Amino acid sequence: MANGIEFAVLGPVTAVRGGKPVLLDQQQRALLAALLVAFPYSVDVERLRAQVRHTRAAAERNGQPGGGETDPLEQALEGLRSRLDGDRPAPGGSILVREGTRYQLAVERDAVDSARFVDHVRQGDAMLQHSSVAAAHAYQESLREWRGLAYAGIPSSAFTETVFIESEVARLTSMRYHARMSLATAHLEGAAPASAVVEAEALVADHPLDERAWELLVLGLCQSGQLPHALAAIRRCRAIIDDRLGTEISAGLRRIESAILTNDSVYLESARVSPPPQKAGSNLVVPRTRLVDRERDVSAVVQLLDERRMVTLVGPSGVGKTRLAVEVCRRRDDPDGPWVVDLTKVTDGALIPSTIATLLSLPGVGSATHLAEVMAVRSCVLVLDNCEHVADYAADVARAIVARCPQIHVIVTGTARLGVTGEVVYEVEPLPVDDVAVELFAERAGGVTAGWELDPKNTEAVHTICRAVDGLPLGIELAAAQLRWMREDQIAAGLVERYTLQHGNLTETIGTRGRLWDTIDWANRLMSDEEARLLRRVAVFAGSFDVEGAAAMCLLGTTVEVSGVLTSLVRRSLVRVVPGSSPTRYRMLATVRRFAREQADDAEMIAIHAAHRAFVLARVESVAGALRSARAGQAMNMLGRDQAEHRAALESAFAVDDAHYALELAGGLAWYWYRVGNIGEGLQFLRTALDLVAGDWRPPEPRVMARALDGLASLTYLTGDAPTAEDAVRRGAQLWSSIGEIGEVARDDAWRAHFVAMQGRPEVAVELARHAVQLAAEHDAVWAEAEGRMVLGMLLRSVGELEEARVELREAIRVAERCGHRWAVTSSTWALMKAAADAGDVEGALATMRVLRADLQEEGDVTSWLVMIHSTAAVLAAAGRPTDGAVLLGAVDALGAQAGFLPAWLDAVDGPIEAAVVHDALDDEEYEQYAAVGSHLTREEVNRLVGELVEGPVPESH
């Protein structure tokens, strides 16, 4: 290790040399923490300035001169360098090195405990399938690195902003949880159940709602011969899950409990912990309950799906079509899925393609044909669930996918066939009421009441219940849920009485809505007024929702009170918990949602929709300002979870002609739509809102109109329509000027310059951009200045002013780093890389690329990452390494096709030129050979390859 120094962050942040701690003050430890978050990459001095609080007084306390023009942060960094180097001889070089404006800790990975921890976890993961004992040892080594909470011991007052440390702490904590779970699993599989029990007990203490941890504990106890303790653990888990969530324990725990009670030692010795709630690379959620006696149906549909490209499952509501589709997906092993698209969230069928595209992270997709084109390289199952209300649109999407995507199989659930060529229909029937239906009731009843059994006293009542609900699985589950409050005979009598009251007798034909509707109505009448009111109000949500959303829909009081009522609804099986969600999110089945919505009268429904619109807008406004800050990633995640609500609120506003609300919400979402590439849907909503406002007698608020026009310009720009984008941003600037928002004016002027250049007037554009930068700087609008300098640097590059372009782009990065505008940092760095390549500075271009690669890895960006790899390929080709460039272009083409995005869409001018640089350096056969190698690489493999390519020496061009 460099000079015997080691760094620790898995506990208090410390530096140790030769076994003795390096004395650091609060500011120095905060700076060290920021550098260790970035390790092994460098970090810009302006980012440090934005992250760590720095004062001249602190520098003077460290013995640094305090007078003159010396930068306090630079002083603090020099003080840290001096403390870290100690008596290190000069020839060895400093531990804290500076290159340009960036600082980096020049130590080996083994010198940092978090790096050692990550490496040990990865070793354990690699060994787990081959040697449980070796894997357990690696996980134990990883966990020994921890000495407390990560990055502890530094007060928050030492930082100007903390999101960078919060994100790193969350990453390391999540990996620690994974290591603990994996260690317990390795012990269990390595015939050390007692050790597994020790680890699992600690896990359930820290994560009491994690049922997979409970499974590990129970299995460890069973395989240690402690069956009574295993049953006691299951009872503890059941009590906690019921109290916190109101739901029954998982299918895995129920199966273990049954095996203990029946003394099924064979199962207990061979049982394994359930898989995670959601399958990797898919949105498929593992059901919490066991599928009862549908094996014949599952096998039949699996076979049909192997033989045909599209299977439609039809049957009455509540018969289990979705559950059957999920089980079929679980039986397949497609590399790119499966994906379940809940179409109950979509009221406008025209939005189905963009809804699917958003789910699959396919930027820019807006039509069924386009969706099919970008999905053509994928191999998966796509489930179009609950499509009867948008059947024609769903048929168009299914038809396009079946025609153009040879490796995609489609499952549709609904009440009737879609009429697509090649479609095969499979009818899902209710369960036989005298045997299988009774078995399902017993299964669900056991989840509600521990130890419930079918016996002579309740058999007749259970059979009556199953006949009353016509063998519909959802009806049986609803009835079984009432065992918390009623006996079996009371449930049976209540159902019979309700059906007789409704229809005259139990066997009467009950119309198109079917028996399930009456069953839900019966369950609804058993609820308290509070429960019924909340059920009606949360039914407005198109997708899942959290307790804050539920509280905003009603006047029940605090979120704690609302949470209690939600738990009651979960216990009644009318609301469900989204597995693995944290904080807890809830959802409703489609039929229950439709029923609940119909229970509200017109006046209440108007109030509910108004409350929903207000909640959605408030949520968007609460994070919109963070989209150009260091918290952009968190804001993007929050907005991503609520996309179904955005659509529902906009459509609700259009339905009541609330054009001004629609304009405000669409304008607030525009930059988010830009970042995720949701161009078609965003433009559709924005243009509809603008058209409605134009026909309204009330003038729009200038701020709202300006924001919407800016959004229109941004999204239109991505379609290549520069004149329309220029007109929109010019009008936006005028409105911002009228209300004195000069920073917004400066930003609009900068982007107008970009759009002018796109129309062939680069010289005019440069002057516009210069003015915009000056305006932003004069009014201290740092985020607008960052974007303005970025645009100016790009324009200067386009007119051949390469050196000035590089100066402006470096300044753009400096300003953007200071205000945390990561998108501007990344975009400017990419342009700086291109400018260096233009000037023939291949070394400089590759050095810039190393920085850009680190930034994009942090953000998890897709489109910018692809563009960066594309540009790197050209730089490598210019450096005399065209075969490396061809490998990267092959990877970009393959990964871009999977994401539905190609660099030429965003980089229309340079993209073809960069590709030509690589192509022209090789003959066709040679290019295809190396591109084929790249086409099989994953993103992780590409990142590793790029690191190897750009970190090594660069051969001279020839």
Image: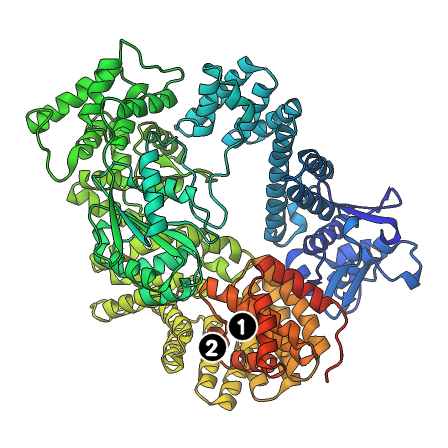
Closer to the camera in the image, 730 or 455:
455
Query: Circle 1 sits on which residue?
Result: 787
Q: Residue furthest toward the left?
A: 504
Is residue 792 placed above or below 396 in the rendered structure? below
Q: Earlier in the sequence, mark 2 or mark 1?
A: 2
Query: Taking 348 as reference, is 204 left or right?
Result: right
Q: Secondary structure at mark 2?
A: helix
Label 2 with label 1: CB-CB less than 8 Å: yes
User: Where's residue 109, x and y in %?
Assistant: 76, 52
User: Where's residue 139, x and y in %?
Assistant: 69, 37
Closer to the camera in the image, 321 or 424:
424
Circle 1: residue type? Glu
Query: Taking 395 as reference, is 548 left or right?
Result: right
Q: Secondary structure at mark 1?
A: helix
Quadrant in the picture for residue 524: top left
Quadrant in the picture for residue 522: top left
Query: Circle 2 sits on which residue?
Result: 751
Quadrant where the image shows the C terminus: bottom right
